[in-house]
Structure formats: structure tokens, C-alpha cells
């Protein structure tokens, strides 16, 4: 069982649709990050959230950290083919602990 | 601006063979990491180096060794490769350890290793 569970594991949608992916845990995290990974490349950091209830926006992407700091969500509005990739959440439980990654959500946006 | 560079990109090994994955970063970062990525498992930490001269085990260190050669370079060695080590390996670096909020980790492009 992974510390961070992501759902869904796979998502295939049409261009223009909205979607939400989730990152859940039974543990509290001091901070949580979201990454996007494209085929043949390493993950690239999208955002870091540190405060319970925090909402951050990055163009069409909205990230939310749960009030209890145990979960997070990523919402994409009007998805585009360029959003295709593997989305990973990663969290730090306590300062000094290593970053722990979830299993990822593989998103495909069809034109 | 190269960032994190790792070699080789692809490698096929026979069971029992040894090999070393090389990694270098040009961002003057103190901390470096080796992860492996398997389908549905996300990234799992193999070893890390908080600073030059130090190395520590991560979540899945068995079957691997590391060397922090200098501040720039961090290598990963498989002494006797096994099929279970077939994976994609990522080297990464950050200014300080990732356990501190707001710290950004930068990844290399990955090394695809197949053990037959």
C-alpha cells in the first residue's frame, strides 16, 4: 500500500473536457507537490502547496490542498492535447523527511 | 543549461552483470538522489546524498550502491543485476534535501535499464 494513493490511474478524455485527479492519504503532510512527466523525460514540478485549504492556479490547472493536509486535487479546465502526460503527486510528512511519490495518473487528451 | 545529465540513456544487461549509471548536475546543488520508476508505483527513492561526502539509503536500496564523487556527480552501481532491477532510473538534484518545504527537485531524463 502506497502512502499516497492517486486516482484514477488512467484517464482518457476529449479535448475541451474538464477533469479532476485526486491524491489521497491517511497521513498528514507538511507540504505536497504536483509534477507532470512527459514520455521520455523526467518529472517537472508544477506546484507546491503547504497550507491546509490552499488553492493555487496555474493557467487552466487548479490545485487544492485539503483542509486536513491529507489529500489534494488537480483540476484541469478545457483540457488540451498538450496536457497529456503522467501526473504525480508527492508529499513530505515532516521537515527533513524525504519526498514520497504517489503512483501517478496517466492522462490522455484526444484532439 | 544542461541541468541534470545522466548516462547511459538505454542499457540491456544480462543477469549477474554489473554496471554504473552516471549522473552530473550543473546547478551547484548540495543534494542528489537516485529514484527508480516502475508502472503504477510512482518514483521510489533508492539512495540519496544530502551533501558532498554523505550518502544514505532510501526506500529500496537493496542491490545498489552509490558514490558521491564530488558536488556535481552521483553514480549508481548495480553489482550483480537481476531481472527485478529492470526499470527506469532517474537522477535528481535539489539545493537542499527535499524534506524542506518549497524546495524544488530537478530530474534528469531517465535511464532505461533492462535485465534479461
Image (cartoon, helix red, strand yellow):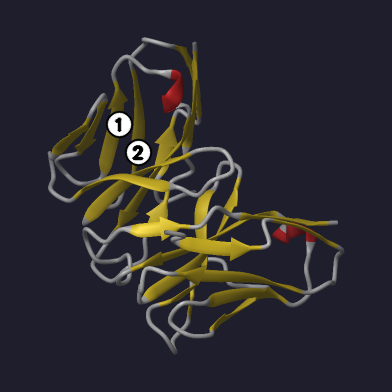
Tell me which chain the residue with mark 1 is part of: A
Q: Mark 2 or mark 1: which is in front?
A: 1
Tell me which chain the residue with mark 2 is part of: A
What residue is drawn where x is 43% and y is 46%? A102
Q: Are marks 2 and 1 in contact (CB under 8 Å)?
A: yes
On screen, A92 above or below A8?
A: below
Q: Which residue is mark 2?
A: A23
Q: Which residue is mark 1?
A: A74
Position of residue B59 in the picture relative to residue B100 (left or right): right
Q: List x then y, in percent, for residue A61.
A: 27, 28
* Residue B37 seen by the camera: yes
What residue is drawn where x is 57% and y is 38%? A39
Secondary structure state at the residue bearing disc 1: strand
* Marks 2 and 1, how far apart at CA: 8 Å
What residue is drawn where x is 51% and y is 71%? B24
Q: List x then y, in percent, for residue B107.
A: 46, 57
User: Which of the 4 image quadrants contains residue A70?
Assistant: top left
Q: Please tell me the numbered disc located at residue A60.
A: none
On screen, B88 above or below A75?
A: below
Q: List x then y, in percent, for residue A92.
A: 30, 58
Secondary structure state at the residue bearing disc 2: strand
Amino acid at each position: 500500500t502506497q502512502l499516497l494513493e492517486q486516482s484514477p490511474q488512467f484517464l482518457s478524455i476529449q479535448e475541451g473536457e474538464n477533469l479532476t485527479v485526486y491524491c489521497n492519504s491517511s497521513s498528514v503532510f507538511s507540504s505536497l507537490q504536483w509534477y507532470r512527466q512527459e514520455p521520455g523525460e523526467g518529472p517537472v514540478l508544477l506546484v507546491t502547496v503547504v497550507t491546509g485549504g490552499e488553492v493555487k492556479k496555474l493557467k487552466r490547472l487548479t490545485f487544492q490542498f485539503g483542509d486536513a493536509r491529507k489529500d489534494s486535487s488537480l483540476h484541469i479546465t478545457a483540457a488540451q492535447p498538450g496536457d497529456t502526460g503522467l501526473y504525480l503527486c508527492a508529499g513530505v510528512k515532516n521537515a527533513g523527511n524525504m519526498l514520497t511519490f504517489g503512483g501517478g495518473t496517466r492522462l490522455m487528451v484526444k484532439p | 543549461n544542461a541541468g541534470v545529465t545522466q548516462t547511459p540513456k538505454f542499457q540491456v544487461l544480462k543477469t549477474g552483470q554489473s554496471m554504473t549509471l552516471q549522473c552530473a548536475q550543473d546547478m551547484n546543488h548540495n543534494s542528489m538522489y537516485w529514484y527508480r520508476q516502475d508502472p503504477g508505483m510512482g518514483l521510489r527513492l533508492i539512495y540519496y546524498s544530502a551533501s558532498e561526502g554523505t550518502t544514505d539509503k532510501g526506500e529500496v536500496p537493496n542491490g545498489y550502491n552509490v558514490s558521491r564523487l564530488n558536488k556535481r556527480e552521483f553514480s549508481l552501481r548495480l553489482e550483480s543485476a537481476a531481472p527485478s532491477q529492470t526499470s527506469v532510473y532517474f537522477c535528481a538534484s535539489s539545493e537542499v534535501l527535499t524534506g524542506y518545504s518549497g524546495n524544488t527537485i530537478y530530474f534528469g531524463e531517465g535511464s532505461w535499464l533492462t535485465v534479461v
